[in-house]
Amino acid sequence: MVSSNGDTPAAADVIHTSDLTKVYPGGVAAVDGMNLTVYQGEIFGLLGPNGAGKTTTASMLTTRVIPTSGRALVGGIDVVKQPAVAKQLIGVVPQTNTLDRSLTVWENLYFHGRFFGMGARRSRAAADELLVKFRLQERADAPVTALSGGLAQRLMVARALLHEPAILFLDEPTAGLDPQSRIGLWEIVGSLHESGQTVVLTTHNMEEADQLCDRIGIMDHGQILALGTSDELKRLVAADTIVTVTADGDLERLAQVLRDDVTDVDATTILDGMVQVAVRGTDRVLVRVIGAAEDAGFAVRDVQVAPPSLETVFIDLTGKELRD
Amino acid sequence: MATKTAPPPPRQMYQTRSAVRSSRIAFGALLLRDLVVLRKHLREFIPRTIVQPLLLCFVFLYVFPTIGTGVGGRGGAAGESAFATTLVAGVVGLTIMFQGIQAVALPMVQEFGYTKEIEDRVLAPLPVSLVALEKVAFGAIQGMLAACIVFPIAAVVHARSIHINLSVHWAVLVTLVPLACVACSALGLTFGTIFDPRNVPLMFGIIILPLTFLGGTYYAWTTLSPVTLWGVHWLQILVLVNPLVYINEGSRAALTTSGHMTLWAVYPALVAFTAFFLWLGTANFRRRVIS
């Protein structure tokens, strides 16, 4: 663990959970005793595969899922005891399109403001302003059903920000978006960061987590396995170089050979048709790995060398790949 | 950790409204949103509201008497007029009932089923139950609008030979119609949270059709006593589980001089049905949106 969290919230905590647990009917703990602190102004990422408990965590913090035990405070307010108050501080961009199909683009923003207690004039001004900021003003009067996936997503982000929430939740924000829209969304998150907006985002995309987040919590089986900045997490892997060898034959034996014959191998992991070797140091690593494999009679088809990534950290922690 | 530290006291760091104030504002805004959408869709609301009652009155009170096959015709023009009086009150009750289904149940089935809009609505700063109750309030408003539109049609569309014995009892009208509208809207909430889009035909086939045909729209409940089996007024007893019976009987009491079930039964039964459907619908709604 790079960073641990005490029980006492510090001055700038926006989110503080203690032993937060959700057990769904059937007995599976989707989130298991989570202690998490998110500080004001940071972009915090929950990174993990599907089913790791990221969305359940976000749903508990946004009052949609009632925890089985433990406690969660958002802006100092208990989300279970005072959901109607806590919701005032929360903006949510869910995975699915939940725009109001009976309203226009502008009306979606305007009525959101009204729901959150903004007066007619203030809500109108805020809707106008956000349409310009999110480059949607030309579509102000369009029905939301006419928006592409990327534009709908942008409108949902604008809507979630309209009431100036203390914290913005983005649940898998770029899943299903085309590459251009994805970059557009990343730019938006970047500018939110500059403006001091606190953001929690859940993702199974390590590039997204790496690029956007100040701190990342790596999740699996309902628990945070490691937590820290991207660099801190990468330093968890003792190795300096990750060599991925693609070869035919018995990969178990290849892994054994590499562990035995190559010096300074920290760990080997068998992935789909590949063996990943974590090596300390960078000196002649490639030559040593290929040599050992070919000496043992393996036909090496491909070799990749890379520094440790979040993917490596995840594999190191769980023994499996993050990508599904 | 050997000793567990006490959880820290909640600290208020951001400006928020009290739950009561925030809920009141959000409830009003949700209602405003629904009324704006209704205004946009008036061109759909009006035909949807008037077609069924208009056709009922046209066929039963104009076509049948004109071609000499009027219901109640054996009693002559007086018999036909008595039936017309029964039907006009029933049509108002039926319209209110259909509003509950069309204004609350069907949109909710859609919102849960595929539009997912409800998922955003429950993030508004008010308790989830109030989001459901706002739908009921809006459905009740539509029910009252529909009753206002339909009553003149029902009272006017009929053959010349027919005389409808209308007599408005205002005290009953202004209490019963809103109560009936809330009851039907709450029924709509219950149906909207039980059925999914695939089951909507089932909802119409096995629940709404029996409710309407056995709801005393075409006959007064008091006149069912001749239907007996082994001396038991089985139909009269059986239909007591149908809320539409009380609405139609109350409507008769409010609008006509014809015989009706005692209001001492109508009001308590409607209040009980309303409370039951509000409870069931709200509980279902919570279960659907919160886990």
Image (cartoon, coloured by chain):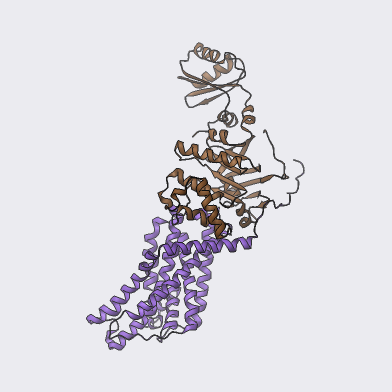
Chain colours: A brown, B purple
Q: Residue at x 36, y 83 (%)?
A: B85
Judged left or right of residue A267, residue B67 is left
Viewer-nearest residue: A119 or B181: A119
Judged left or right of residue B230, residue A309 is right
Viewer-nearest residue: B244 or B233: B244
**Screen quadrant of the N terminus of chain B:** top right
The image quadrant of residue B93 is: bottom left
Q: Residue furthest right?
A: B3
Give coordinates of residue A206: x percent, y percent.
54, 33
Q: Residue at x 38, y 83 (%)?
A: B223
Viewer-nearest residue: B211 or B182: B182
Q: Residue at x 59, y 61 (%)?
A: B23
Residue B288 in view in this figure: no
Q: From what the image shows, is residue B101 above or below residue A129? A: below
Give coordinates of residue A157: x percent, y percent.
52, 46
Q: From what the image shows, is residue B248 above or below residue B40? A: below
